[in-house]
Image: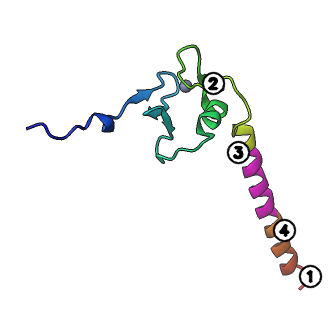
Amino acid sequence: MDGMNFSDLKLERKECAKCGATWINGKHIWRGTGASGDSSELDLAGLVCNNYGDDQCINPMKGKTGGETWEYRAGYIDGMIKGRMDTMKGLGNLDSDS
Ligand SMILES: [Zn+2]
């Protein structure tokens, strides 16, 4: 009995030997989260492949910029820390002078 054809459901899994990124059926999937997006290959390039990848890297967006980068993330985190500090300073001011 072979009435069902599962060939369309075959998963093609590729893994970048350099950065360990995974593609399933040609779509990049983030490790850990399993998330994927239209710009995820570009983000991956900015975060990993442009820094650590080489000729073996299979990310088609490797070498391209414009995605999310560590600089962007660092700036985002710096901004959050500054916000916290300002809030704490504000609380400190409330405690003094009273
Ligand atoms: Zn790569």
Marked residue nearer the N-terminal end (4 or 3): 3
> Residue 62 occupies which quadrant of the picture?
top right
Q: Label 3 belongs to which residue?
A: 73
State which tag comes first along the sequence, 2 or 1. Answer: 2
Front: mark 4 or 3: 3
In the image, farthest residue toward the front:
3
In the image, 22 versus 98, the foreground residue is 22
Q: Amino acid at mark 1?
A: Asp
In the image, which is nearer the foreground, mark 1 or mark 3? 3
The residue to which callout 4 is attached is 89
Query: Could you give the CA–CA distance between mark 2 and mark 4, rounded to whole angstroms?
Result: 43 Å
Q: Nearer the viewer, mark 3 or mark 2?
A: 2
SS for dot 4:
helix
Residues in magenta?
73-85
Q: Position of residue 25 (x, y in %)?
A: 43, 33
> Which residue type does callout 2 highlight?
Lys
Residues at discs 3 and 2 in contact (Cβ within 8 Å): no
Q: Is residue 12 left or right of residue 56?
A: left
Query: Which labelled disc corresponds to residue 97?
Result: 1
Sequence order check, earlier mark of 2 and 4: 2
In the displayed structure image, the side of residue 97 where residue 32 appears, left or right: left
Which residue is identified by label 2? 62
